[in-house]
Image (tube, rainbow, N blue to C red):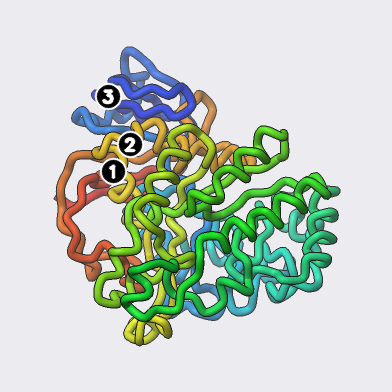
Amino acid sequence: MILHFINARLIDPEAGTDAPGSLTLRDGAIAGPAAKPPKGATVIDCGGKCLAPGIVDWGVKIGEPGERHRESFRSAGLAAAAGGVTTVIARPDTLPSIDTPEVLEFVTRRAAGSSPVRIRHMAALTKGREGHEMTEIGFLLDAGAVAFTDVFQVSADTKALSRALIYARSLGALVVGHPQDPGLSAGAAATSGKFASLRGLPSVSPLAERMGLDRDLALVEATGARYHADQITAARSLPALRRAKEAGFDVTAGTSIHHLTLNEFDVGDYRTFFKLTPPLRSEDDRQAVIAALADGLIDVIASFHTPADEESKRLPFEEAAPGAVALETILPAAMRLYHGGHLSLPQLFRAMALNPANRLGLPQGRLAEGAPGDLVLFDPDAPFLMDRFRLRSKSKNTPFDGARMEGRVLATWVGGNQVFRAEG
């Protein structure tokens, strides 16, 4: 099978270019540009719209096993395809946790049989994600785990965490940490400050993030482990991250699309769709994180798609479940950064596709010859009104409900197979 895309605006994050051109896929892989369509090719006219590598979304929660009513592999896959996400990196915070090779093999089979996009799994770093006894990291690597994390359940047992990092280092495994001090952040629903005080919300200082990061980076220095901080959201965390990178530690960092595009005031009158982990930060923090992303200090943008049912969200703010769905909104939300002049399209796709793929050792995220034919065609300027009830996710907890947005996915391909096409 040969596909030939013409009249495309090619977004190449590896070359850092945004230019008109053509692209050929042959047998599910990128065969490079061609002046003329190869013999027997199906020609696809992109109409001058943007053609980019499919998004590699790192940190997606899927409800299988245990919470299939919130999200299944099928519903998550359909949502991902509609959002231009071609590879999902799923979290292990399931019921039960993905902490044994048997559970990992089960979810891998379920995902392969149900989802139209690629799904790879992270495994738990400690058994039950309880922070005490490490999992069988070697066997989980053999079963296909791409990284190890306890997600938001931060271990207070530093000695146990140190042992896990030493063992991960011996196997070359990537450890993903959530930089928060578990004691300070327990029970917090907002970032401390005047706004949280006026609303009477239990809050936590952004220093809790820096303290958690400082501990993790000290352990990385002691063990030499490969480490990724999943969400850097506060300006006070950035100097420590910069020092670690300048010292040559094998460290990368990511942030959430919601923390890049929303701030603490969006909570408004206790709107629980805006309750996230960590809580939304100040506008100064948001701007600082955007600047860190622009200069490459922060490497990855992720959706942190976290489905929650209506019953979990229709509660007082401090009692409501944290998290928001974002597989279908990550690209239009990212276009806010593009239209605001903060980041170019190649910079955005470097953070959303190339960098996560590189860090996880995956071949996706690029337009280079031989790379998988995972592509998204989108119009960065198309306006629309977000209606949460049109989302393909089983859960509808998006903070962008009713918002005017720009950036519409027109079509998505995985391995050269079209898995989504926009209506109209």
> x and y percent of residue 54 in the render?
42, 42
Q: Is residue 400 left or right of residue 178?
A: left
From this view, report whether residue 183 is shown above or below residue 52: below
From this view, report whether residue 162 is shown above or below residue 26: below
Of discs 2 and 3, which sits in the foreground? Answer: 2
The residue that mark 3 highlights is 6
> Mark 2 falls on what kind of element?
loop
Sequence order check, earlier mark of 1 and 2? 1
Asked if the residue under mark 3 is in contact with the one under mark 1, i.e. CB atoms within 8 Å, the reply is: no
Q: Which mark is residue 335?
A: 1
> x and y percent of residue 305 in the render?
43, 62
The number of callouts visible is: 3
Q: What residue type is disc 1 on?
A: Met
Asked if the residue under mark 3 is in contact with the one under mark 2, i.e. CB atoms within 8 Å, the reply is: no
Compute the Cα span from label 1 to label 2. Answer: 10 Å
Q: Residue at x 48, y 53 (%)?
A: 234
Residue 268, visible in the rendered structure: yes
Q: What residue type is disc 2 on?
A: His
Crowdedness near tag 2: few (<14), some (14–19) or many (≥20) residues, C-alpha within 10 Å: some
Residue lying farthest to the top in this orientation: 35
Q: Which mark is residue 342?
A: 2
Q: What residue type is disc 3 on?
A: Ile
Q: Which mark is residue 153?
A: none
Asked if the residue under mark 2 is in contact with the one under mark 1, i.e. CB atoms within 8 Å, the reply is: no
Sequence order check, earlier mark of 2 and 3? 3
> x and y percent of residue 306 in the render?
44, 68
308 or 50: which is nearer to us? 308
Q: Residue at x 77, y 70 (%)?
A: 157
> x and y percent of residue 154 in the render?
65, 68
